[in-house]
Amino acid sequence: MIFSARQFEFRFPRPALIMGVVNVTPDSFSDGGKYLEPDAAVDHALELVAQGAELLDIGGESTRPGAEPVSEAEELRRVIPVLEKLSRQVKVPVSIDTTKPGVARAALEAGASIVNDTGAALRKDFALWKIVAEYRAGYIVMHAQGSPPAMQVNPVYRDVVREVSGFFSERLGLLLNEVGLPMEQVVLDVGIGFGKTLEHNLALLAGLRSFAKWRRPLLLGASRKSFIGELLGVDVAHRLPASLACTVLAVGEGAHIIRTHDVAETLQAVRMAEAVFARKKNVE
């Protein structure tokens, strides 16, 4: 299985990729405001690469539950200076976390290689997808129920694993048939925390292996999310151990890319788990 993103190519099976998160926002749930200035964001991104991040995800609009949208102009103001500086300093793929076609195009022009589309479930036209195809960029199609301002207001599923899988089937069909996007450029993300209750998130984590049938890399982003606090009664600053538990379980169930705020710790946990899983296969 291949994941292609402009000049970058990853071949699976291989060790799970670690994607470091850089929020260039004043209101993200985990680190809002810490990296709002371009130099601070770039320094943080470089630190994450030094810790072992093999991809970076740059976002200029918070997608936390209840977050209000920002204008395209404001999102561009936040992320483009960061992307322009990073593209000259790092040799890893940089992803732009956005829902806006205009931001996606400007980010790809500034050196991004991947579009992380948290609005994939709400997309009603093909404008962003055509941009991805034009630039031969990687594309992360994430499931969500509703938009950030209201997505956690009573989300309902009959069978969350089956419904997310059905969403992937529908989106993959549109990407291939409507814009001709090669499947090698697509990554799937079940959207932990995006329009899901605690029980929905746990069901998706337990059912990750069922998504292997799509033969596309699976990204998992559970880092510090609110369902951990709901289950364990801990605030954002104290959710790392549970985040690592989710990560190790996800890698054991076939996740290929782990999106995290805590690169060094996550890398250690993943590589240790992979070493054990490899021995387990030999025993079996």
Image (cartoon, rainbow, N blue to C red):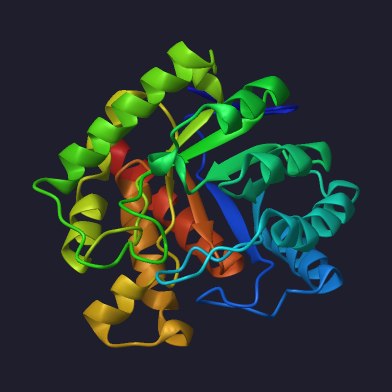
**In the rendered view, does 264 fall on the left or right side of 107?**
left
Q: Nearer the viewer, residue 39 or 103?
A: 103
Q: Quadrant of residue 217?
A: top left
Q: Nearer the viewer, residue 188 or 19?
A: 188
Tell me what residue is drawn at x 38 percent, y 41 percent.
121
**In the rendered view, does 249 fall on the left or right side of 161?**
right
Q: Is residue 46 visible?
A: yes
**In the rendered view, does 243 fall on the left or right side of 94?**
left
Above or below for 240 versus 238: above
Tell me what residue is drawn at x 66 percent, y 29 percent.
137
Q: Position of residue 283 (x, y in %)?
A: 26, 40
Q: Is residue 54 visible?
A: no
Tell me what residue is drawn at x 73 percent, y 74 percent.
35
Above or below for 60 versus 184: below
Q: Nearer the viewer, residue 262 or 95?
A: 95
Q: Nearer the viewer, residue 248 or 181?
A: 181
Q: Position of residue 49 (x, y in %)?
A: 73, 58
Q: Position of residue 24 (x, y in %)?
A: 69, 67
Above or below for 43 versus 72: below
Name the quadrant of the C terminus: top left
Q: Position of residue 261 (x, y in %)?
A: 56, 67
**In the rendered view, does 211 fall on the left or right side of 257?**
left
Number of numbered labels in the structure image: 0
Q: Residue furthest left?
A: 158
